[in-house]
Amino acid sequence: MQAVTNHHSIVEPFKVLIYDASAAALNSTKDKVLKSGFYNVLSETDRKECIGTIIRQNPHVVITDHRLPDGLDALDYVAGLRQISNIPVIIWGNRLPEKIENSLLALKKVYTLCSKDGVFTLQDLLQRLKLMRKDPELWS
């Protein structure tokens, strides 16, 4: 017996979580995400609160800077995050060191963007993640 899928069921809105210790950078990224048409945006400036939000709110993607407080970098953050979630992560910053970028790209569901790539690249990546969530079989 085949399972029947109801394509008309209500789909939960696509949630974006932005994590950045810098409130100014967080607000700038949040503004770009909102202007890209993604209106369900969560934000955190504290790492523990960010993890708690991931557990409680179940966002569909996390956007974070490659430089984090407490001497952590994006690689440390993703490694810790992978212990509790396989959520896609977009690392967005001014300039990623090549070694860190290569290490990040070796991880599943991790995408890197440079600020100079622009908001359209971020918007495109978010749209692709949203489509992937909507119909994962098309992306496997």
Image (cartoon, grey):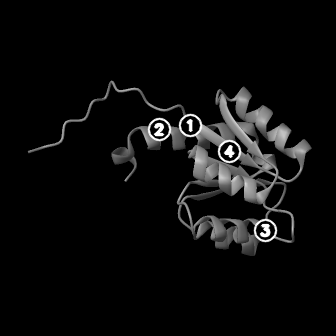
Distance between mark 2 and mark 3 Cα atoms = 29 Å
* Residue drawn at point x = 66 percent, y = 54 percent: 52
Q: How many other residues sit within 10 Å of disc 1, few (<14), some (14-19) or many (≥20)?
A: some
Q: What residue would you read off at disc 1?
A: 127
Front position among marks 1 and 3: 3
Query: Where is the N terminus found, in terms of image quarters?
Result: top left
Secondary element at tag 4: strand
Label placed on residue 17 = 4
Distance between mark 2 and mark 1 Cα atoms = 6 Å
Q: Is residue 91 visible?
A: no
Classify residue 115 as left or right of residue 80. Answer: right
Label placed on residue 73 = 3
**What's the residue type where badge 3 is placed?**
Asp
Q: How many other residues sit within 10 Å of disc 2, few (<14), some (14-19) or many (≥20)?
A: some
Q: Position of residue 38 (x, y in %)?
A: 64, 30
Label placed on residue 131 = 2
Sooner in the amino-acid sequence: mark 2 or mark 4: 4
**Callouts 2 and 1 close, C-beta under 8 Å:** yes
**What's the residue type where badge 4 is placed?**
Leu
Distance between mark 1 and mark 4 Cα atoms = 15 Å
Q: Position of residue 48 (x, y in %)?
A: 74, 59
Front position among marks 4 and 3: 4
